[in-house]
Amino acid sequence: MTATTDTKRQRLRAYLHDRTAEGECYLKSKFVARDLELSTREIGQLFADLREEADDLDVERWAYSNATTWRVERR
């Protein structure tokens, strides 16, 4: 894992914490990628990593249609 990956992961976590301030949310990878100026591939990998590692967020792959949708909720 590189410093760049850590920075991207931190940016995604901050973004998700902001988006889940009012409760669970559903997010499409392509829109998260756009908001964070990352590729959809990067976002997909970061979400997959968070799903395994995050102890403060519940991250679940919810659906796939034109882009992966993720359900995210704070623990």
Image: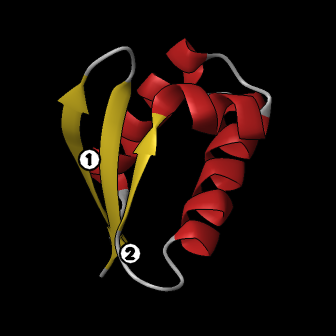
- Give how far across and how far down residue 33 sits, in percent: 65, 29
Which residue is disc 1 drawn over? 52
| Secondary structure found at label 1 | helix
Instruction: Reply above or below: 51 against 49.
Output: below
Q: Hey, which quadrant is residue 70 in on the image?
A: top left
Residue at the (29%, 48%) spot, across then down: 51
Residue drawn at the location 66% of the way across and 64% of the way down: 14
- The tag on residue 2 is none
Which residue type carries mark 1? Glu
Residue 41 visible in rendering: yes
Image position of 6 (left or right of 66)? right
Mark 2 lies on a secondary structure that is loop
> Where residue 68 sits: x, y (%)?
34, 26
* Residue 25, percent from left and from top: 39, 64
Q: Amino acid at mark 2?
A: Asp
Q: Which mark is residue 56?
A: 2
Residues at discs 2 and 1 in contact (Cβ within 8 Å) = no
Q: In the rendered view, does 22 fall on the left or right side of 5?
A: left
Quarter residue 21 falls in: bottom right
User: In the image, what residue occupies the spot 48% across and 86% down?
Assistant: 22
* Neighbour tally class for label 2: few under 14, some 14-19, many 20 plus, Cα within 10 Å: few
Label 1 packing within 10 angstroms: few (<14), some (14-19), many (20+)? few
Up-down relation of residue 72 to residue 74 (above or below): above
Quarter of the figure with the N terminus: top right
Q: How many numbered circles does the render carry? A: 2
Instruction: Looking at the picture, tell me which residue is in the foreground, 13 or 29.
Output: 29
Question: Distance from label 2 to label 1 (Cα)?
Answer: 11 Å
